[in-house]
Amino acid sequence: MTAMNKNRVVLRIAGMDYAIRGLEPEEYMHKLGIYVDKKMTEIMKNNVKLSTNMAAVLTALNVADDYAKAQENIERLMNDINGLKEEIQRIKAENERMRKENSDLASLNNNLQLKLVKTETELREARNSLEKLTKT
């Protein structure tokens, strides 16, 4: 991308205007400028004796701190996500095992019901035969 295609914005940070160019959308660059201005203004209000350069360095350190904490948070969240993915896989495997067990038990139940019907039929036939024998 050439310089002609870059977005150009003017940002006001700590009372000074800065013209910047970048590939990012203008809204994004303004958002960054507002963030840096807020941080720097906060630092300068807390210590009015700071030069602009010193305030800029402290602002950079604060932003670096925010970035490092955000990275740590991302890493912790990624670890949480990975742990949850593993838990989901474990639950899916357990669910599949239980489905198979349920299917096996349903099949066993059907076989036992058939056996029961067969045994009841045999018992009925035996009773009928016994009745016939005792009547004669």
Image: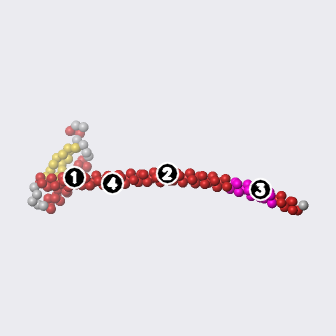
Give the mark, 2 or 1, whose residue is nearer the N terminus.
1
Q: Distance between the residues labelled 3 and 1?
A: 85 Å
In this image, 106 relative to 52: left or right?
right
Helix, strand or loop at label 3? It is: helix
Q: Tell me, for residue 47, which label it has, or none.
A: none
Mark 4 or mark 2, which has the lower sequence index? 4
Badge 1 amino acid: Ala
> SS class of the residue under badge 2?
helix
> What residue do we see at 83% from left, 58% from top?
129
Q: Percent x, y for residue 119?
A: 74, 56
First-in-chain label (2 vs 3):
2
- Residue 114, magenta (yes or no): yes
Judge whether residue 130 can be spotted in this image.
yes
The spot of residue 56 in percent (x, y) is: 15, 53
Q: In this figure, which residue is indicated by the disc labeled 4?
A: 76
Residue 122, label in figure = 3
Q: What element carries label 1?
A: helix
Q: Residue at x 33, y 54 (%)?
A: 76
Asked if the magenta segment contains residue 83, the reply would be no
Asked whether, in this view, residue 93 is left or right of residue 133, the answer is left
Q: Are marks 2 and 3 in contact (CB under 8 Å)?
A: no
Q: How crowded is mark 2: few (under 14 residues within 10 Å), some or many (20 or more)?
A: few
Q: Where is residue 133 in the image (x, y as percent from the top left)?
A: 87, 60
Question: Which circle, 2 or 1, is nearer the viewer?
Answer: 2
Looking at the rendered structure, the kind of residue marked 3 is Glu
